[in-house]
Amino acid sequence: MSNQADRITLSEAAKRISVNPATVRRWIKAGKLPATLERTDRGETYFINPADLDTIRGASPAGRTERPRPPALSEDLAAIKDAQAAILDQMRANSEAQEQRIRSLEAELHDTRAQLSQFQDQMMKALPAPAKPSSSWFARLFGR
C-alpha cells in the first residue's frame, strides 16, 4: 500500500483538472485513468496518483482537448454584409424618391385648393343676389 500523501481522491482529481467527478469516474471505469479502490470508514473510495493525471490531462491545462475555433469572418458573411449594404443604399434612394414625390403632391394639392377657391369666388359673383323674402302671411298676421 502506498503513502496517503502521494494519492488523491476522485473528487480532488476532478478539481485539479477542472472536470466533473463523474467524468473522472468514467475514465477510471474505461481504463483511461489508473486508480485503486479502497475501503475506508466512509465506504469504498477511489485513490489516484497525481502523476497519472498528467497522462490524462495531455497538453491542455484543464484536461480537455482544445476545441477548434470558428474561422474569422468567412467569405459568405462578407457577401451577406455587402448585400445588406447594397439593400440599405437602395432603400435610402427609394426613400428620397418617395419624399420628393410627397413634396410634389403636396404642392399640387395646394395649387388645386387655390384654383377651387378662385372658382368658388367666381361662382358666387355670377349668381344673382338672393331676393329679399316677401312678407309671409305669418308676418302680416302678427305684424312682424
Image: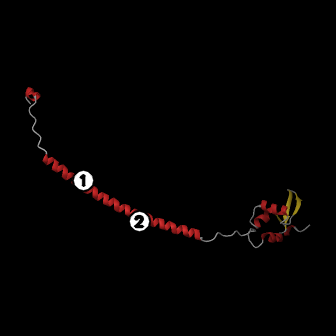
Q: Which image quadrant is residue 143 in?
A: top left
| Marker count (numbered) | 2
Q: Which image quadrant is residue 91 in?
A: bottom left
Crowd band around label 1 with a 10 angstrom C-alpha radius: few (<14), some (14–19), many (20+): few
> For the residue labelled by badge 2, is the local secondary structure a helix, a strand or a loop?
helix
Which residue is at the front of the view, 110 or 36?
A: 110
- Compared to 65, does 41 lie above or below? above
Image point 84% across, 61% down: which residue? 29
Q: Which quadrant does the N terminus fall into?
A: bottom right
> For the residue labelled by badge 1, is the local secondary structure a helix, a strand or a loop?
helix
**Residue farthest toward the right in the current orientation of the protein:** 1
In the picture of the structure, the residue carrying the numbered disc 2 is 93
Horizontal side of 33 relative to 96 (left or right) equals right
Q: Which image quadrant is residue 51 in?
A: bottom right
Tell me which amino acid carries mark 2. Ala
| Residue 101 % position (x, y) | 34, 60
**Residue farthest toward the bottom in the current orientation of the protein:** 59
Tell me which amino acid carries mark 1. Arg
| Residue 100 % position (x, y) | 34, 62
Horizontal side of 82 relative to 137 (left or right) equals right
- Compared to 123, does 89 lie above or below? below
In primary-sequence order, the first of circles 2 and 1 is 2
Image point 80% across, 63% down: which residue? 24
| Residue 14 % position (x, y) | 77, 64
Protein image colouring: secondary structure
Q: Which quadrant does the C terminus fall into?
A: top left
In the picture of the structure, the residue carrying the numbered disc 1 is 113
